[in-house]
Amino acid sequence: MKKIAIIGAGISGLFFANLLENEKSYSYKIFEKKNSLDLSDGYGIQLSVNSINLLNKIGFKKINVSDICFPKKVNFFDAKNSKKICDIDLSQFNNQNNRYTTLKRSKFIEFLLENIPSEKIVFNSDLINIKNEDRLLLSFKDKKIEEFDYLVAADGIYSKTKQILFKKEGLPKYFNSIALRGNIRNLENFDISLYLGPNFHFVIYPINQNKEFNFISIIRKELIQEEISDRNLFKDSTFISNLLNQISFKSNVNLIDNIEDIKCFPIFVSKKVQIPQSKNIFLTGDAFYSFPPSFAQGASQSIEAANELFNDLKNNTSNYYKTRILKTKQINSRSSLNHFTFQLSNPLNVFFRNIFLKYFSKNKKFLENYLGKIYNH
């Protein structure tokens, strides 16, 4: 029986563990740096049809229907006046069992944890070194050393595994953007609302059937290295208020009075695709590559990547990185284009952008190529 170490108890690592639970050829252990998983936050995630299809294979269809939502459209608005520009019908990519789904990230983590025995997750496990001899020797900060046949790094954008393997080249880069995230209650529109503004955009979408909504705004913000490294800056109430005011003054949506539990964090993305030299070490999820957050595919791609890796190991093939690199290029190009398009500031560019959005949002051939190839993979 082959032993697998999973570094990180995020979406990709937990989904991969769920797949391994039904595969008797492998044993696994999850190492999580934190002392627990936060199941209290109310922030949301979006899951497109490509990932729902995979999740249903591990019982996701049994999740309480009141804890999820099925938006049918993405409505595009001009943030300045809330005038609707166009909409995209998401339901055209659905089928009977797999639908575009939104929910609280904490509820999703709870679901992924249900089938994983608690003794298989080791908390307070900070990886500090990897030795690849006949087998992998993993050293942790608590001086524990364990031996495995495979290592799966699913420890996110700030992956410690990646830094051990690639040194400074494994560090992500600041995307010149900051995210504001919070919750809004008691709205009536159960679709996804995307507001486009100069050098910012924000999204509001439902996360269950109880009129709870997620708010996420991406704001262009250049910072010097000292500011980027100052984690206290992103917890400072004055700094957060100034950012919220910045977008509120350019929007007629009442954000200041309605957003609760608001938090702020800098956005980092991967510099480039990096592949370990060792054939028994794999990167997955954000540890493999983190995209600009403007295509809502972060969670879905973490699930897809874990599934691809599982199949690669199970079938003793070596297609994982080839497949992942191709999909990464597709997602990254779309994410970057969306980010640029959503945040145009020149009025003339905005005018023509809106014309193009109205046309392409109803062009079936374009939508099938731009979204369908991703959602229905």
Image (cartoon, helix red, strand yellow):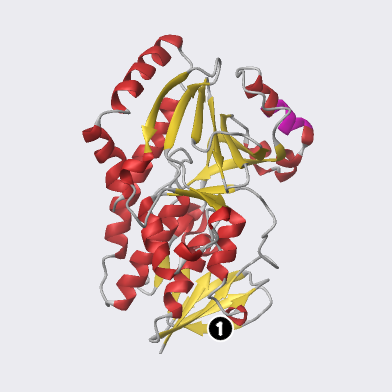
In front of the other: 145 or 206: 206
Which quarter of the picture shows residue 359? top left
Looking at the image, residue 43 lies above or below residue 112? above
Q: Quadrant of the N terminus?
A: bottom left
Magenta highlight range: 238-243
Residue 302 rendering spot, x and y as whole percentages: 44, 57
Instruction: Look at the numbered disc 1 and give the secondary structure of its residue.
Output: strand
Does residue 239 show up magenta in the picture? yes
| Residue 92 placement, left or right of 165 | left
Residue at 35% across, 50% down: 328
Which quarter of the picture shows residue 369? top left
Q: Residues within 10 Å of mark 1 (few under 14, many from 20)?
A: few
Residue 102 rendering spot, x and y as whole percentages: 51, 48
Does residue 339 show up magenta in the picture? no
Q: Which residue is labeled 1 in the image?
A: 146
| Residue 76 placement, left or right of 223 | left
Residue 100 rendering spot, x and y as whole percentages: 42, 48
